Amino acid sequence: MDSRVWDNRAWLFVVPVMAFVLFSSLIPMMTVVNYSFQDSMGQNSFFWNGPGWFQNLLDPTTAVGARFQGALLRNFAFSFTVLAIEIPLGIAVALCIPKSGWRVGAVLVAIALPLLIPYNVVGTIWQLFSRTDIGLLGVALGRSGVPFNVTQNAGSAWAVIVLMDVWHWTSMVALLCYAGLKAIPDAYYQAARIDGANRWSVFRNIELPKLRKVLVIAMLLRFMGSFMIYTEPFTVTGGGPGEDTSFLSIDLVKMALGQVDLGNAAAYSLVYNLITLTVCWMFFTYTTHADSKDVA
Amino acid sequence: MSASAISAPLATSGTREARAARGPKGRTIGMALYMLFLFVPVYWLVNASFKTNADILSGLSLWPQHPTLENYSKIFADPDWHSAFTNSILMVVINTVISVSVALPAAYAFSRYRFVGDKPLFFWLLSNLMAPPAVYALPFFNLYSATGLFDSIWAVALAHCLFNVPLAVWILEGFISGVPREIDETAEIDGYSFPRFFVKIFLPLIANGIGVAAFFCFMFSWVEQLLATTLTTVNAKPIAGMMSRAYSAAGLDWGLLAAAGTLTMIPGAIVIWFVRNHIAKGFALGRV
Amino acid sequence: MAQITLDGIGHAYGGDPKTEADYALKPIHHVWEAGKAYALLGPSGCGKTTLLNIISGLVIPSHGRLLFGDRDVTRLPTERRNIAQVFQFPVIYDTMTVAENLAFPLVNRGVARPRIDARVGEIAAMLDLTADLKRRARGLTADAKQKISLGRGLVRSDVSAVLFDEPLTVIDPALKWELRSKLKAVHRALDLLMIYVTHDQVEALTFADKVVVMNDGRAVQIGTPAELFERPEHTFVGYFIGSPGMNLLRGEVAGAEARVDGHVLPLGAAYPALPQGMAVTLGIRPDYATLTAGDGLPVTVTRVDDLGRKRLAHASLGGGQSVVATVPHGMGVETGPARLRLDPGKIHVYVDERRVAGRDLVGRAA
């Protein structure tokens, strides 16, 4: 099974990566941990605060706790919504990609374009598009009588941000699924024809099961992406109206860089990071566990 | 979010699938609709970039009434914009080169050897992929200020290593594991020294993987803006920083913003064009 | 159940062939009889899979008509043809159990549940899958998966034919034999027309009632295993079938004698129709060329291979050509001069790769 050779000299190969990760992850993380257990009187004088910041953060009756809980719930709702749209839509788009000919390349290039637009420009595109005075979408909705206003109305703001994320990331799901579909041997489709399966049955019994692996990757990537989202909604709504589109990252940046509330922000960071890791880990173990159960 | 709001989009995509199922014609229609969805907002940006601000604000028009290159000429004439574009590109290129070259030996080690702590190390590396950049904004600010790297392109290039190094290790490990280790052994028997083997034989074999890893590093570094704007102020200001200047006190300069936005789409489009034949395989990340 | 007729079926990918070489499958007439087991045998790229796919409807032929019984099905889509096909690699539906996999072709055709269960049970019993019926198919071994594929091919009792496209390629050699005899038994039990594509002559000769040998897009001979062995109609059949293949020697024929490398060989038949001294190819199987202690052609043995059950000698005829010959039991043999006996009745004469029938020395055509 595992043909790898036991050789501790391999550590030498890993040293450069370790150096970079040490510098760009571990040391910064230690400062965060450090802040999270201390309080400051200003002027760089710190003292031990124990788990105080964490107690504060996890207690919804405190101001910080309420803020955190609100952002957390909003963010979960957002992640769940975009996953529920992007995954099925991505599969559908992948099925629509032409099978051969020059159009394949053209379609793939066109589809991939949103993935390489800087996040702030994505935000700008949708801000411009949804403005009620100069945006095509905003004006069209306004004229058709839909009460639509991104800066005033929470529903409108949510709709635009979800739509923007779908616009931005469905292509990634589609490209992953397309790669998965390409890997299915022709014999499966031929066998299905001979077995008299209809199109739905081919999708349900061949394509979907074979896409399982890529879908796990797609769902993980999209969960992570949507759970860390910052620049795009911030450009469009600034977290508003009120706090209505203030997701975890937006809230955290406001707290850490805007209000320089170091202790709270540090505790916020650690808990936020931990939640992300836990959800990814649970999802990953659940899917691999389901796999191994099949094989047994 | 109510349950009905969530299930509604599911239902629409279901019918879309059913339509796609009807054969080539349904597929073409489905794809055309998706393309429309992708390109109408982009068109709106490009459209605005060719309008004057007065034209933009005077009312809705589907194409420029008084087409102008004024917004673009403003950008091309301004050295601040030049340096912003140069900074953005340099950050990304430096980051991509660092990420891939550092990840290569590590990916080789993870793919070929077992060693003390290999598994925890690999998962710890991957866990950095899952870390929200917002968590690092403040500590990076402190760290790079303390080391004197703040407001340099190196600050951003190094900061993006946070997620790009693990990403490159992950992608490359997948591709390297696809190369049979007999090749390593044969080269050893043929008397190749390890460095010569690695450069002369191994790197060409995983050239595709390197391309894919570089593409993804480029992509994630090029699009990330939170760290890029937090870690720079004046000297190393990237495009995003310049663009936020267009949201200035004097009101929004929409034309300028749209032109700058349009220009930032070009490098991405060029990169995709180069990798167009590998997109399908590349997105499988060598693992599927 | 009905016979299948190939009425001038030919195929050129991209249509409109200009020359013979443009055909992936050169036009062929053949009738596959109901209830028989056929093998399509040939090297890879010989057009056998194309022919199979034409029958199943995955490929629409550019030329000719395909008849199931009297019905023209040339342009009928696969799913309406009543054909079952088993592919080279196991095709299973990952999310279904073994039983659901086997039932799938029947469920899709709206067969009643009790009939499905009965038929699935029957097929599973034949293939030793009964114990696994409730298990998820994706966890099984490659050969179990291929048995499921075979089972799905066999489960419909109304099919015109069951087609096999090299179905044992991925199977462990030790299990190949077992699966092949299982297939043979299934064929006897179900009385279906079966067409089996392979490049392995042992598989073809042990499975089939009749073997179609194909080469370069052409069916070069159709016959029983014995016919292919005893009377290869084409030099290709001669050397492709048998291990080692037939000896092929350049020579000349004059009446009932042949000249090869200066030796005169008596033949079992006379060939008055061939011009005197015409260059031909002579074919004789190693089984009928024996080293002898008595009279025979003077040859030089260059190598002896001991295959355990028999020994084979490579003997040079002196003029640059050599023959593989059988060494009789108990005969001591070393490299160097020896005597070779060729059974005159087993020597075939080929002109332009095709066998020429001679006139029997008694007077009948052979």
Image (cartoon, rainbow, N blue to C red):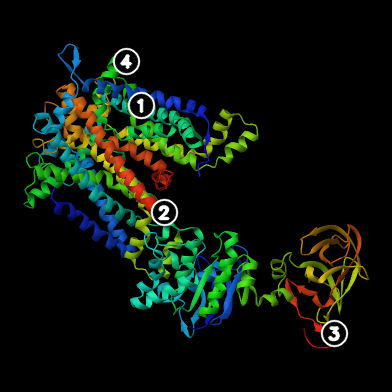
Which label lies toward us, 1 or 3?
3
Secondary structure state at the residue bearing disc 4 = loop
Q: CA distance from mark 4 to mark 1?
A: 20 Å
Q: CA distance from mark 1 to mark 3?
A: 93 Å
Label 1 sits on residue: B90
Give how far across and how far down residue B20 sits, in percent.
Answer: 30, 61
Secondary structure state at the residue bearing disc 2 = helix
Q: CA distance from mark 2 to mark 3?
A: 69 Å
The chain identifier of the residue carrying mark 1 reads B
Circle 2 packing at 10 Å, graded few (<14), some (14-19), many (20+), is: few
Give the left or right position of residue A118, taking residue B103 as reference.
left
Give how far across and how far down residue C238 sits, in percent.
Answer: 72, 70
- 4 and 1 marks on the same chain: yes
Give how far across and how far down residue A147 sits, in percent.
Answer: 6, 48
Q: Nearer the viewer, residue A26 or B89?
A: A26
Q: Quadrant of residue A16?
A: top left
Label 2 sits on residue: A295
Position of residue C340 relative to residue A36, above or below, is below
Which label lies toward us, 2 or 3?
2
Label 4 sits on residue: B147
Q: Nearer the viewer, residue A8 or B150?
A: A8
Identify residue type, mark 3: Leu
Label 3 sits on residue: C361
Q: Are marks 4 and 2 in contact (CB under 8 Å)?
A: no
Identify residue type, mark 1: Leu
Position of residue A115 relative to residue B137, above or below, is below
Q: CA distance from mark 4 to mark 3?
A: 106 Å
Give how far across and how far down residue C131 sits, in percent.
Answer: 44, 66
- Taking the spot 52% from the left edge, 27% from the top edge, the residue there is A9
